[in-house]
């Protein structure tokens, strides 16, 4: 069917038979030209699909306009559509360009709709930001949980709609609810990081400019008084004794019923006492202590090695053992008898790494020791404070704590008033030198 054919509904319906009789390969697409309307073409695809096209010349170039498919468009309707399109071309319009412009506009609308959906705070945090955080943030689980907790009221809101007034209102409500300025600052810093990532990806404009609350440069330094230290150690010992007695009573009960007994406790009944004593004597952060493996304990050198992967600063360091820290670690080693250097010191019963110190466990210990306003992290402050009060210079304290900047250690400077007095006394010898 190389020549033009007067197309009818019957001819189109039996097109395959006519093409085969003409020797055409039905496995390939082919065009059939309408003899009645110049430029009208019926294209049969290899799949069997039949579509109407109008061949046109626009601005000196050949092109075609897709009119629709048969049988949705009958022969008669296809001819009318072709005549309308040809009339537009005669007036100087370009149907192909118009169709492409419509397609671009539709694609732009779809893209914008996707961007709008992606720019919703909760969608972005649960999607792209979570993927980024899992790779780059060691504490990504805590960060993501805190974001959901602090900003649940904005979870379904477009990030670009957040204003300075919104943030100021949120901060005001947080303070009114009893949160500390430092807590509010940390929450805003987390959200500001999310908005910054969204801005970097072109999802929103610049995030709201809200300054952090100014805080006392010294920050919170809570350490144990001698009396509190005595009560804490006594509470740890009493807890150990109580747990041993509970195990003994349970074994008595099992023995009476001819059931297998539970194993006797070793030097420590669980992780709490050795963990507290170790942090008191090394100043390790919670994550650093819980991340310790036996390969990081060097008894020969008397050092505890902190891997860069568990250090907040991202830098490895060695912390010397005190006599008490060594005793705790040796007792823990004798109890566990570790054979794998990669095994963690503080684990569950299934040997999985302990992830945190339970809030209930910690609060019960503080209540038993009659200590108020003392967090687990304050064990680290206690270590640093005792060093400073023992006249250890701030640079050395900074290195022991793993601070990335000695300025972070300045919060403890007030605990060494003699350090400042000694600095001022140096002026005494220069007052009359001139």
Image (cartoon, rainbow, N blue to C red):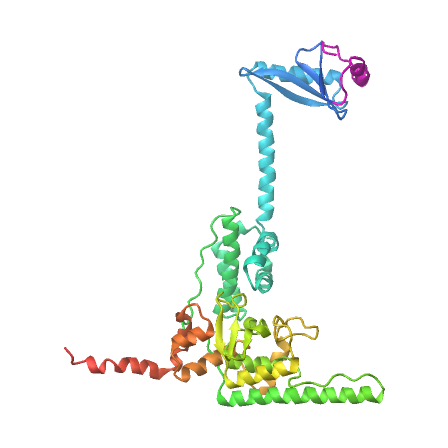
Q: Is residue 371 visible?
A: no
Task: Examine the rendered structure and indicate whether residue 315 appears above or below residue 92.
Answer: below
181 to the left or right of 38: left
Give residue 51's position: percent from left, percent from top.
Answer: 72, 22
- Please tell me whether residue 181 belongs to the stretch shown in magenta: no
180 to the left or right of 124: left
- Please tell me whether residue 15 belongs to the stretch shown in magenta: yes
Task: Examine the rendered structure and indicate whether residue 317 appears above or below residue 374.
Answer: above
Q: Quadrant of the N terminus?
A: top right
- Residue sitting at 47 percent across and 54 percent down? 208
Q: Is residue 119 visible?
A: yes
Give residue 423's position: percent from left, percent from top.
Answer: 29, 80
Residue 298 vs residue 385, the one in the foreground: 298
Outermost residue on the left side: it is 434
Outermost residue on the front side: it is 300
Q: What is the quadrant of residue 233 in the picture?
A: bottom right
- Residue sitting at 58 percent across and 83 percent down? 330
Q: Which residues are magenta?
A: 1-27
272 to the left or right of 52: left
Residue 295 vs residue 26, the one in the foreground: 295
Give residue 129's position: percent from left, percent from top.
Answer: 57, 54
Task: Examine the rendered structure and indicate whether residue 23 appears above or below residue 343.
Answer: above
Give residue 219's position: percent from left, percent from top.
Answer: 44, 73
């Amino acid at each position: 069917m190389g020549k033009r054919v007067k197309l009818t509904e019957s001819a189109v319906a039996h097109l395959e038979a006519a093409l085969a009789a003409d020797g055409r390969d039905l496995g390939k697409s082919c065009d059939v030209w309408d003899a009645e309307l110049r430029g009208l073409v019926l294209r049969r695809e290899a799949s069997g699909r039949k579509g109407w096209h109008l061949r046109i010349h626009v601005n000196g170039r050949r092109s075609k306009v897709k009119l629709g498919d048969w049988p949705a468009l009958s022969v008669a309707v296809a001819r009318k559509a072709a005549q309308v399109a040809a009339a537009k071309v005669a007036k100087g319009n370009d149907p192909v360009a118009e169709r492409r412009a419509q397609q671009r506009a539709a694609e732009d609308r779809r893209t914008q709709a996707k961007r709008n959906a992606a720019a919703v705070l909760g969608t972005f945090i649960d999607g792209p930001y979570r993927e980024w955080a899992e790779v780059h943030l060691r504490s990504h689980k805590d960060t993501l949980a805190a974001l959901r907790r602090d900003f649940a009221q904005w979870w379904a809101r477009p990030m670009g709609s957040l204003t300075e007034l919104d943030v100021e209102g949120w901060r005001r409500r947080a303070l009114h609810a009893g949160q500390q300025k430092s807590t509010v600052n940390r929450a805003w810093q987390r959200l500001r990081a999310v908005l910054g990532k969204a801005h970097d990806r072109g999802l929103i404009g610049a995030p709201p400019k809200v300054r952090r609350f100014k805080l006392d440069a010294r920050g919170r330094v809570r350490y144990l008084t001698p009396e509190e230290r005595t009560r804490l150690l006594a509470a740890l010992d009493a807890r150990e004794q109580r747990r041993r007695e509970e195990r003994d009573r349970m074994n008595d009960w099992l023995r009476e019923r001819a059931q297998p007994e539970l194993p006797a406790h070793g030097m420590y009944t669980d992780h709490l006492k050795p963990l507290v004593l170790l942090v008191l004597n090394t100043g390790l952060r919670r994550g650093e202590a819980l991340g310790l493996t036996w390969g990081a304990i060097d008894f020969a050198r008397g050092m505890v090695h902190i891997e860069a992967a568990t250090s907040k600063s991202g830098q490895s360091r060695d912390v010397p053992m005190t006599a008490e820290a060594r005793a705790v670690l040796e007792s823990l080693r004798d109890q566990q008898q570790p054979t794998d250097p990669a095994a963690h010191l503080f684990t569950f019963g299934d040997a999985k790494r302990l992830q945190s110190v339970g809030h209930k466990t910690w609060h019960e210990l503080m209540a038993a020791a009659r200590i108020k306003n003392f967090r687990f992290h304050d064990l680290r402050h206690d270590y640093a404070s005792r060093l400073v009060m023992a006249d250890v210079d701030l640079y050395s304290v900074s290195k022991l704590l793993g601070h990335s900047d000695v300025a972070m250690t300045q919060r403890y400077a007030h605990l060494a008033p003699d350090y400042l007095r000694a600095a001022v006394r140096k002026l005494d010898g220069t007052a009359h030198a001139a």
